[in-house]
Image (tube, grey):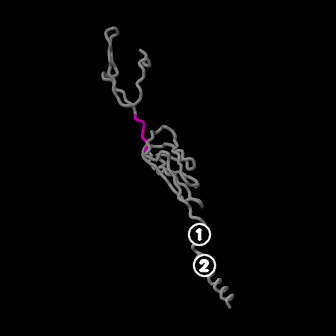
Amino acid sequence: MMKQWIIEFGVLFLAFFYIGCQNTLPLAPEPLASTIEFADSTDITKILGNGTYMNTVSGVGDGAISYSSEKPEIATVDASTGEVTLIGIGTTVITANKASTDSFEAVSANYTLTVKDKNLSTIVFADGTDITKMTGKSTYTNTVSGLGDGAWPDRSEFPL
């Protein structure tokens, strides 16, 4: 009788334990949080005509990374390498998406890219460009002003 009671109690205990626990253990671990960030995550300004550039990404996770541009008429992005080609003047958003995997969640990051036109330089001579002077009389100076950030060439570059 005692033996029977111990067996029944054991079976009942195992049944309660099994019913109470069967939904509490996860079948697979939950994916971990991924991270992704651009090397330069601030607003970036580039000059049209200066070719291509890369803004590399880093972070935690093993998902494949793909890139896109909000406005491809301003800048295009190689979807697999992230190389950016400047196309037109304006502002766009460049985005990197890291795909989810069994181990890591999906994540994305972006930055704002502004593409500007080259600033054209101007040169203005105070006395104009057509000047007549007699040689051998005295030194003459025609003051120059203008806009631009380039270096002034040496006088030797202007033969007399």
Which kind of residue does numbered mark 2 sit on?
Answer: Phe
Residues 26 and 92: in front is 26
Q: Is residue 6 above or below residue 24?
A: below
Magenta residue span: 114-119
**Residue 140: horizontal and vertical position, in percent?**
32, 15
Q: Is residue 92 above or below residue 15?
A: above
Say which element carries label 1.
Answer: loop
Residue 29 shown left or right of residue 154 in the figure: right
Residue under numbered circle 2: 17
- Mark earlier in primary sequence (1, 2): 2
Which kind of residue does numbered mark 1 sit on?
Answer: Pro
Q: In this view, does 68 lie above or below 151?
A: below
The residue carrying pointer 2 sits among few (fewer than 14), some (14 to 19) or many (20 or more) residues within 10 Å by Cα, namely few
**Residue 63: horizontal and vertical position, in percent?**
58, 55
Residue at x 31%, y 10% (from the top left corner) = 138
Residue under numbered circle 1: 26
Task: Report the residue that reaches farthest toward the top.
Answer: 136
Task: Report the residue that reaches farthest toward the front.
Answer: 2
